[in-house]
Image (cartoon, rainbow, N blue to C red):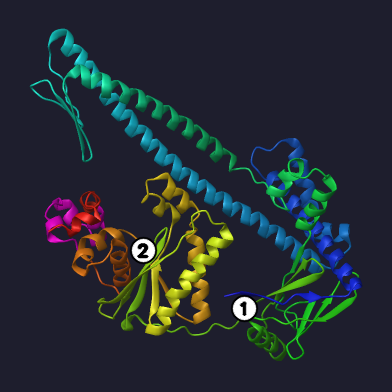
């Protein structure tokens, strides 16, 4: 696993600092040009292109991008290779983000269509009910009852929605106070849902377009709003676009990089600029110094070398160096026969269970956190601190960590309120998985992922009441037992309700069939004797 370590701030002479600034600006110009060329090349290969794009395609095929950039800017291969790699990485990052947004929009569109269908069905039912009341008043016929409204023989009407029951004295009272306002409300809701669907489909169509804005879109859009002096914005814009340069490593280089060289003894970093001058300065890393020294020494002493990537970033009057190395893989401890520490991740807490090798719960704990209204950096710090507590328990117990193979779309369907969904949209499931994997390497503790299917339902039915714990703690227990290879069978009182075809299914499919029963049972009802 590649690791990135940042150095302390390095102060250079004015001459060396200006030389590095010029190189960074040149590097970013090459990167921006490469990104534009790569996007044009992709556009030229789209089926059904016009003649102008065909001419561009023939021009592109005549000479490689690498050669064209090298001739235009007059730099070495190492600058061009790194700039092109950075441009490709930026394009790939945008594509992955678009794919994520596209999947999220498709998920929302599917839910909106379901809501439109259910709302339309409810509206049609009420309209039919109103027509039956009109026919009853005209010809003394029979009023057609619906699921929620029941007309009694004495003329009263009972309306039940959940646990709330309302009784109206007569049909006229029921029609004026409930039926007509409800029909109007559902029509309005249906109209808003269709407008929402139209906007989502429009956004989905726009995700097909690829746009890259080096320097952030936020700053680009701010030039005509908050900055009265355009020169101030231009300085910030140029600094945002030209503040960092990353040179890719090479395995065939003696120290892992042809432009940067690092001495593990004196901790001196040398950099060969675009004009051929070599800049040397002392560079120390407060974290990861031993790992960097070990990788550089291995590269200097043996033929089987590894690439070492260096990035240099401007920070006012100083520079910040980032070194990316791939240390040798170390053996992680953790065996399932010793049990496991299992976690169930939710939008505002992590529920933890410590299990022995037989799946018995030894300890449980809930670690709350709050990321509502926080920035992405603040949320990342909070999640990192929470996972730090989890891994400390793993170190104390000497057990590996088990977690769900998280998917944000699976979590979205669990919460209905808009407030919960807003919090959940900031809950980056991929980020917490990434943090867990990083800390797994940091502490050399094995991390295992299992399927999250029906863990909350199984925990609610089987372990919540018997162990006197919350549904999240019960779910974490199920996650740990699933990693240990223990199968949770459907209880007999639910199994009897399944059809013969459903009983013949595998256990996980049986829980899927039993979901229509378990989802209607609230956790509070499980404690009722």
427 and 166: which is toward the camera = 166
Q: In which quadrant is the N terminus drawn?
A: bottom right
Q: Secondary structure at mark 2?
A: loop
- In the rendered structure, does residue 234 fall within the stretch colored magenta? no
83 and 268: which is toward the camera = 268
Give the answer, above or below, for where 345 lies relative to 201: below
**Residue 374, image quadrant:** bottom right
Q: Is residue 60 left or right of residue 420?
A: right
**Residue 326, image quadrant:** bottom right
Residue under the image location 73 percent in, 46 percent down: 220
Q: Which residues are magenta?
A: 489-512
Q: Is residue 212 visible?
A: no
Residue under the image location 42 percent in, 61 percent down: 406
Q: Is residue 194 left or right of residue 467?
A: right
Q: In which quadrant is the C terminus drawn?
A: bottom left
Where is residue 240 shown, x and y percent of the image? Answer: 75, 56
Where is residue 465 shown, x and y percent of the image? Answer: 20, 64
156 and 457: which is toward the camera = 156
380 and 21: which is toward the camera = 380
Q: Which residue is mark 1?
A: 326
Q: Is residue 32 visible?
A: yes
Q: Which residue is mark 2?
A: 451
Of callouts 1 and 2, the N-terminal one: 1
Give the answer, above or below, for where 166 lies relative to 169: below
Where is residue 481 shown, x and y percent of the image? Answer: 29, 72
**Residue 283, image quadrant:** bottom right
- Residue extending furthest top? 138
Q: Secondary structure at mark 1?
A: loop
């Amino acid at each position: 696993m590649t690791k990135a370590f940042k150095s302390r701030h390095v102060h250079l002479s004015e001459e060396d600092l200006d030389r590095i600034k010029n190189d960074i600006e040149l590097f970013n110009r090459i990167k921006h040009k490469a990104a534009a060329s790569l996007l044009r090349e992709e556009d030229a290969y789209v089926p059904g292109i016009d003649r102008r794009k065909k001419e561009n395609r023939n021009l592109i095929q005549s000479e490689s991008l690498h050669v064209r950039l090298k001739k235009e800017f007059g730099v070495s291969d190492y600058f061009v290779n790194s700039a092109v790699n950075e441009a490709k990485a930026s394009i790939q990052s945008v594509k992955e983000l678009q794919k994520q947004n596209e999947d999220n929009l498709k998920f929302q569109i599917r839910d909106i269509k379901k809501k439109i269908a259910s709302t339309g069905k409810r509206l049609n039912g009420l309209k039919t009910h109103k027509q039956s009341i009109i026919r009853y008043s005209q010809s003394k016929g029979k009023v057609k009852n619906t699921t929620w409204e029941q007309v009694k023989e004495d003329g009263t009407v009972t309306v039940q929605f959940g646990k709330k029951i309302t009784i109206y004295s007569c049909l006229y009272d029921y029609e004026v106070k409930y039926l007509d306002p409800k029909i109007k409300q559902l029509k309005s809701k249906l109209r808003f849902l269709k407008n929402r669907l139209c906007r989502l489909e429009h956004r989905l169509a726009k995700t097909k377009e690829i746009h890259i804005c080096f320097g952030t879109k936020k700053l680009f859009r701010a030039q005509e709003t908050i900055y009265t002096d355009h020169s101030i914005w231009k300085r910030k814009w140029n600094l945002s676009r030209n503040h960092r340069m990353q040179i890719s490593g090479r395995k065939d280089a003696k120290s892992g990089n042809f432009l940067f060289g690092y001495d593990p003894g004196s901790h001196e970093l040398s950099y060969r600029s675009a004009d051929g001058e070599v800049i040397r300065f002392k560079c120390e890393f407060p974290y990861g110094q031993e790992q960097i020294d070990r990788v550089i020494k291995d590269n200097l002493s043996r033929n089987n070398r590894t690439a070492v990537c260096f990035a240099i970033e401007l920070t006012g009057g100083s520079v910040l160096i980032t070194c990316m190395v791939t240390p040798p893989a170390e053996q992680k401890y953790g065996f399932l026969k010793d049990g496991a520490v299992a976690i169930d991740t939710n939008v505002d807490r992590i529920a933890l269970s410590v299990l022995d090798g037989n799946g018995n719960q030894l300890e449980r704990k809930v670690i709350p956190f709050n990321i509502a209204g926080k920035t992405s950096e603040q949320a990342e710090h909070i999640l990192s601190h929470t996972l730090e507590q989890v891994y400390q328990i793993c170190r104390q117990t000497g057990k590996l960590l088990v977690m769900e193979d998280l998917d944000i779309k699976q979590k979205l369907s669990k919460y209905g309120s808009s407030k919960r969904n807003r919090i959940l949209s900031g809950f980056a499931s991929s980020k917490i998985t990434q943090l867990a994997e990083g800390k797994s390497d940091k502490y050399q503790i094995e991390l295992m992922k299992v399927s999250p299917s029906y863990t909350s339902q199984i925990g609610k039915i089987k372990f919540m009441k018997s162990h006197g714990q919350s549904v999240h703690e019960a779910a974490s227990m199920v996650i740990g037992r699933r990693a240990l290879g223990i199968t949770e069978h459907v209880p007999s009182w639910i199994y009897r309700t399944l059809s013969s075809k459903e009983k013949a299914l595998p256990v996980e499919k049986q829980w899927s069939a039993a979901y229509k029963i378990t989802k209607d049972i609230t956790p509070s009802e499980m404690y009722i004797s």
